[in-house]
Image: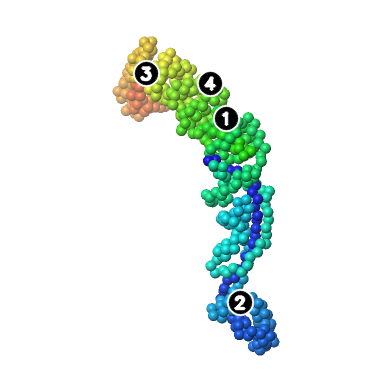
Amino acid sequence: MTKGIVSLKLSKYLRKIEVVTKIFKKSSFDLYLVASIIKNIKDPIQAIEFIKEITGNGSLYKLFSSLYLKKSKEFSGEDIENILNNSLVPTFQVSNWEYYYYPSLDITIIGNKVFAGDIYKDGNYIINNLNPDEDFVSSKVVQNILIDDDYDNYEYIYENNICKIKLVNNSNKYYELSLKDFTSSIEERNINLLDLKYDNQILEGRFDQLNNEYVMNLNEKELKFFKDSDLYIIEEVGVRQVKICKFFGTYWYSSSVIEYSKDQNISELALNFLIDSNKIYEVKNKLLLNIIENINSYLIKCNTVNSYLKIKNSNNFITLGLKLLINKEETFNWSDDVLKIFLSNYTNLKELLVIYSLNNKLDYTISNLIEIFNSDKRVMSEEDITKVTNHLNDVEKLHKEINILVGEMSQSGVRENMKKIKIDSNDLVALKKFYNKHMAHKNSINKETNLENLKEKLIYFQSVKKVHDKVLKLIK
């Protein structure tokens, strides 16, 4: 089955019919009197004379005589009985009904409803669709316009050489149109396919009639490639597959998105195109990551991330690369340049250990090496173990010197007696800062492993010790 949207020029008549109906309303006294005169006095001359007798020659005479002459022509015997017995008077109403009639389908559309045949020629349609309190009087056509030069879009279904179209949007019903009328009514479009390819046959699925605007839109897409006769356009969530075919003398197209998350093959096709066309570095990260993350092959993922990071830096790709490092499925030869990037951006010890295991000759900081050493020095080279050991020995020596100074200053009693002495304010402020900052956080010094920082701290502590000794003499 093939279905979709088609532009058709179907002849139709816009018709307006005037419908006259009669309804009964509560009768007024004047109509009641006139109805009584009509029933009981058959001779019109005698009736007028009677009206003159009861009204005189004034305005009432003119009113009732005029009303009598008019209603005697309008009222039927049944109307007269209704007025006299039920006090109901007939009132005539005129309404206009507008509808479209399609000769090729022999169908009427009125008020978003579809009926078989021409409702005007169906004598029962009007009567059956009046309000319960209305009686049919007459009808006539007051407008009949042929419309045969307008194209309208219709939903169609084609199956087993039978064409059907939908006439009303809010309905799911389709109406059969002869194949001859269908093909002869299709809008002729001079389509320039440019470099698009097509199948010269009817294909199953949804196919809308093609137009040049859509062709131009496809032609402007940069991330597109052909496979067989189908066009594929790379989009953020998937690849749009566009099929074009030709039947009934015109072109039709089908467009659907194949999501990366639902089709690994389409993800690989998209990735191969981006790599081969060298557009991989031009697309947005989100699009490229959507493609890569939906490829099952571990090596393809690693190779793509490795190649990308060698050319273009990206936090998203660094994160993905580190994730691939940790969740290793197969052996992959990461480039040294990319490993350096990973080393500068790793977030945990596990990542650092994997990077070191792949290449221990990178520019590791002493902090990196200490982190590895404290975790598992068995993975380290002898050279790096020696480097860390020597560094830690130097750190320990500095810790001892600093701790000796801190111990002397904390046990001297200076801190407790500073308020009792007079001393240069700058020195006193410096000493107070020292006690407040370092005496309460002595353990933080022992955690420091940076030699340069420790050397600076030692110089600082030595300078403070001189002030301390000066204060100590004053106290004694």
Q: Which mark is residue 174?
A: none
On the picture, is 457 further left or further right than 57?
A: left
The residue singled out by tag 3 in the image is 372
Task: Give me the C-alpha separation between circle 4 and circle 2.
Answer: 99 Å
Q: Residue at x 67, y 58 (%)?
A: 144
Q: CA distance from mark 2 to mark 3?
A: 113 Å
- Of tags 2 and 3, the one toward the viewer is 2
Q: Are marks 4 and 2 in contact (CB under 8 Å)?
A: no
Front of the two marks 3 and 4: 4
Residue 155 versus residue 67 in the image, above or below: above
Identify the mark nearer the N-term, 4 or 2: 2
Residue 394 visible at all = no
* Real-space Cα separation, disc 2 to disc 1, in angstroms: 77 Å
Q: Percent from the top left, x then y, of residue 282?
A: 56, 27
Q: Amino acid at mark 1?
A: Ser
| Residue pointed to by mark 1 | 229
The answer, for residue 357, to whether it is visible in the render is yes
Q: Secondary structure at mark 1?
A: loop
Res. 311 mark = 4
The image position of residue 301, as x and y in percent, is 46, 24
Instruction: Determine the image quadrant of residue 437.
Output: top left
Q: Quadrant of residue 249?
A: top right
Would you say the residues marked 2 and 1 are in contact, meaning their CB atoms lie under 8 Å apart?
Answer: no
